[in-house]
Image (tube, coloured by chain):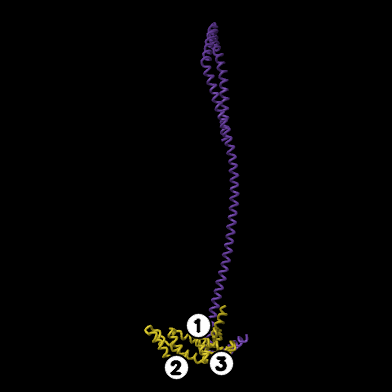
Chain colours: A purple, B yellow
Amino acid sequence: MQRSVIVIKRTLRAKIALIRLIGLTGLIELGGAVLLAPATGWCAEGGAGEAAGGGSWLSLFFYVINFAVFVWILVHYAGPAARKFFADRAGGIRETFARAEATYKEAQDLANRMAERMARLEAEKQQLRTDLDAETGYIANRIREMARETALRIVRDTELTGDAITEAAHRRVRAKLAETTGRLARELMVRSFSDDDQARLLRGFEEKLAQEARR
Amino acid sequence: MKGSRVAKRYARALLGLSEDHGQLEKWGAELERLARIADAPEIALRLASPEVSHEARIEAMAKIAERLDLSYPLRSLAVVVARHGRIANLTAVSESYQDQLDVLLGRARATLTFAREPKAEDTAAVVRGLEAMVHKTVIATVKVDQALLGGVVAELEGKIYDGSLATRLSEAARRLAG
């Protein structure tokens, strides 16, 4: 945008210089033409007269009068309009140039503001990126920590469950063994229990009662 | 019912009277006979029937006491119990009487359960052991239960002294099971 403003400004300046150049050159050319045209006519006519045997100063005089009338008419009638035209044109160009200057300044301000804003946005973006990185790092660490705790808990629970299952199995085996042993012992006792065994048990019971009595 | 307050009151009254007359054991035995008859199903059913009038119930108890040839205080007790509608409590009265009599005489009753039929000397030895322990005369009731496998179980004054083989085996199995 700043570049386009600069181009417009340069174009305007070039146009003003060209108009000035054309005006000055035109005036010179116009003056030269006015001065040289009668002389050219006179010279042409004089040359022809001299070639034919004589020139005419009267013709030159009429030409000068004619030219003077022409200049007067031109200056009197076309001069103000031309001056006004060129003055209006110069005013319009100056106004355009001033608007272009103002636009250029606004554009520059806008460009500066945009640059500041872009810098601010860039800083905000950097800040956001930093914050996001920090937050992401924190969340990732937290997730890793939770995963580690969960894994430890699962391991611990698994160990406890395994121990409990093992203990229950041991208990079941012991209970089964005890039941079988008790049943076998009972069957053995029923088959082979004798009066002597009964007498021995009774003696033991009497000794137990005696011990109780001594307490 | 044995420990009911009503039964204890009747038993205490009869015990006081029998102690005064020096008939503790005899009247106790008569009371036990009377209670056993009154508690017999066919008699208890008739005496409890609503078709039997109150007077007829009293008369029936008087006749039972007379037929059993009970002492006069026991006959009177039978009539009083019938009059007060406490015939169903007679067994409890008898048991309470025996309990109070045992306390009065320093006796204790034990139930001895053997695995097989015991010899007299075995029973006596166990009773001696119990007497030495509680310092009372022990009156034993002997039972047989083959489920014990061997040994004996004594129940005395609410406590159980277990010397049976079945219990030993159970304890061994329990220890083995952990």
Q: Give the foreground label among 3 and 1.
A: 1
Sequence-first disc among 2 and 1: 1
Secondary structure beneath dot 1 equals loop
Q: Name the residue type under label 3.
A: Ala
Quarter of the image where the N terminus of chain A is located:
top right
Q: Name the residue type under label 1.
A: Gly
User: Which residue is identified by label 1?
Assistant: B3
Q: Name the residue type under label 2.
A: Asp
Label 3 resides on the chain identified as B
Q: Give the foreground label among 2 and 1.
A: 2
Sequence-first disc among 2 and 3: 2
Label 2 resides on the chain identified as B
- Alpha carbon separation for disc pair 3 and 1: 30 Å
Displayed quadrant of residue A137: bottom right
Look at the image and tell me whether residue B76 can be seen: yes
Q: Are marks 2 and 1 in contact (CB under 8 Å)?
A: no
Graded by Cα atoms within 10 Å as few (under 14), some (14 to 19) or many (20 or more), the crowding at tag 1 reads few
User: Which residue is identified by label 3?
Assistant: B124
In this picture, is B88 found above or below A76? Answer: below
- Location of residue A212 in the rendering, given as x and y in whole percent from the top left corner: 60, 85
* Mark sitting on residue B69: 2
Q: Are marks 3 and 1 in contact (CB under 8 Å)?
A: no
Residue in view at x 43 percent, y 92 percent: B66
Residue under disc 3 on the same chain as residue under disc 1: yes
Label 1 resides on the chain identified as B
Quarter of the image where the C terminus of chain A is located:
bottom right
Seen as rendered, the residue at the extreme left is B51
